Amino acid sequence: MGKNKVAIIMGSKTDLKVMQAATEALDQMKIPYEISIVSAHRTPEGMVEFAKTAHKKFKVIIAGAGGAAHLPGMVASLTTLPVIGVPVTVGKLKGLDALLSIAQMPKGVPVATMAVDNAFNAGLLAARIVGAFDEKITKKLESYRKTQIKNVRLMNKEIK
Ligand code: RP5
């Protein structure tokens, strides 16, 4: 189980209600994860320590943050692991600030940016990344995909 471990980090406990959805997706795919608060601004040294050692434990990092949202990009600058960023809705700009901050990375330092508050997709994308090297996970992803097809067929029946 441990070989596909995913890190889920976020800037504050207030991000947890959004980031919880990443754990749901990973639970569905039976992928292990560790969740923790790592703040780029309030615990900068802790963030550097986390990012520099993450490759020893994890295959993918999911990083959620709101506002200035420097966490995903800064972590990506300190590791070669794939980093998936989740912009979290906070304050008057309602996540648009975090979305632009996370998406607008400079050439050479990639962050895969999800839609605002869409931590579930971050979990699914992490599953797809580790699933590329693990047939069991690929099968679970395939079954999830087929369930979605069935659900849309059902919706069509319901509206006709
Ligand atoms: C960001 O600031 C966090 O990711 C959070 O989304 C936002 C607000 O944090 P709190 O003031 O609620 O702790 O760093």
Image (cartoon, helix red, strand yellow):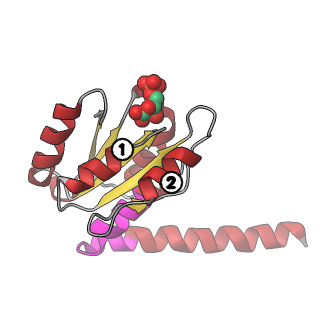
Give the answer, above or below, for where 4 lies relative to 95.
Answer: below
Horizontal and vertical percent position of residue 134: 24, 72
Q: Looking at the picture, which amino acid does disc 1 mark?
A: His
Q: Give the residue drawn at x 39%, y 29%.
A: 12
- Image height of 70 relative to 147, above or below: above
Quadrant of image for the N terminus: bottom left
In the image, the segment drawn in magenta is: 123-139
Taking the magenta stretch, the answer to whether it contains residue 136 is yes
Mark 2 Cα-neighbour bin, 10 Å: few <14, some 14–19, many ≥20: some
Dividing the picture into quadrants, the one containing residue 92 is top right
Q: Is most of the magenta stretch helix, strand or loop?
A: helix
Between 125 and 117, the one nearer to me in the picture:
117
Q: Is residue 124 above or below residue 23?
A: below
**Residue at the image position 31 percent from the left and 32 percent from the top:** 41
- The tally of labels here is 2
Asked whether the viewer can see residue 16, the reply is no
Say whether residue 125 is left or right of residue 79. right
Per the image, the residue denoted by label 1 is 70
Indicate if the residue with disc 1 has its beta carbon within 8 Å of ligand 1. yes
Classify mark 1: residues with Cα within 10 Å, few (<14), some (14-19) or many (20+).
Answer: many
Residue 135 on image: x %, y %: 28, 75
The dot on residue 78 is none
Q: Which mark is residue 100?
A: 2
Q: Between marks 2 and 1, how big is the CA–CA gap? A: 11 Å
Q: Amino acid at mark 2?
A: Leu
In this rendered view, identify the residue nearer to me: 150 or 89.
89
